[in-house]
Amino acid sequence: MTYHHLDCELLHRDTPKVDRARALQHFRDGKLPVLIVTDVAARGIDISDVELVIHYDPATDADTYVHRSGRTGRMGKAGLVFSIVLPNQRFIIQKFAKQKQIPIQEKAMSYGALVDPSGERKSYSGQKAKQRESSTGDRTAGKRGPSRNRS
């Protein structure tokens, strides 16, 4: 976030109540473009107009996945969810997609850009580098169902 000059705050289980309230108000007012929240700290937060949710760790079950993802795409608005997973964790996301009938689009991250997983991109040294991480993504439009992207 610092690299892209984006102000952000982190809320976690031990964030003092006054700091949490201040960060939430700044986010709601648009003074803070990015709010990073752990799963524990996210419980009970109701913020409208969340455009993006990023899952760093896979959810424990499909219902938790839907709940986390449901913070975006509310009230008829579109939202995007990225799920960052390792290749050996793909099965978890695929299982959730099947259980909840969620369309998931797999992508790979390469030098800050999302690309098709089978695609190649030249490295900075000019050599082609195979994609090593994968991402899936899905846009939701007005439903509390999840959308995802992994990398």
Image (tube, rainbow, N blue to C red):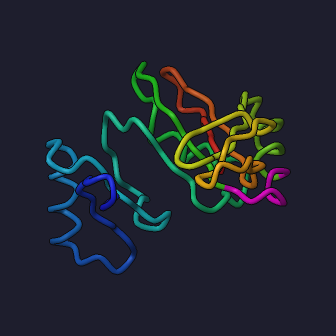
Taking 52 as reference, is 63 left or right? Answer: right
Front residue (pair 40, 84): 84
Residue 54's x, y, as percent? 51, 50
Taking 72 as reference, is 120 left or right? Answer: right
Count of numbered marks:
0
**Quarter of the image holding residue 99?**
top right
Residue at the image position 56 percent from the left and 49 percent from the top = 111
Front residue (pair 2, 97): 2
Q: Judge whether residue 86 is colored magenta.
A: yes
Q: Quadrant of the N terminus?
A: bottom left
Q: Judge whether residue 16 is colored magenta.
A: no
Q: Is residue 92 above or below residue 141?
A: below
Residue at the image position 71 percent from the left and 31 percent from the top = 105
**Quarter of the image holding residue 15?**
bottom left
Residue 87's x, y, as percent? 80, 56
Magenta segment, prevailing SS (helix, strand or loop): helix
- In magenta, the rendered stretch is 85-91
Residue at the image position 51 percent from the left and 39 percent from the top = 70
Residue 10's x, y, as percent? 33, 67
Q: Is residue 144 above or below residue 109?
A: above
Q: Is residue 68 above or below residue 77?
A: below
> Is there any visible trace of residue 64 in the rendered image?
no
Q: Is residue 119 above or below residue 19?
A: above
> Is there any visible trace of residue 123 in the rendered image?
yes
Front residue (pair 127, 84): 127
Residue at the image position 62 percent from the left and 49 percent from the top = 83
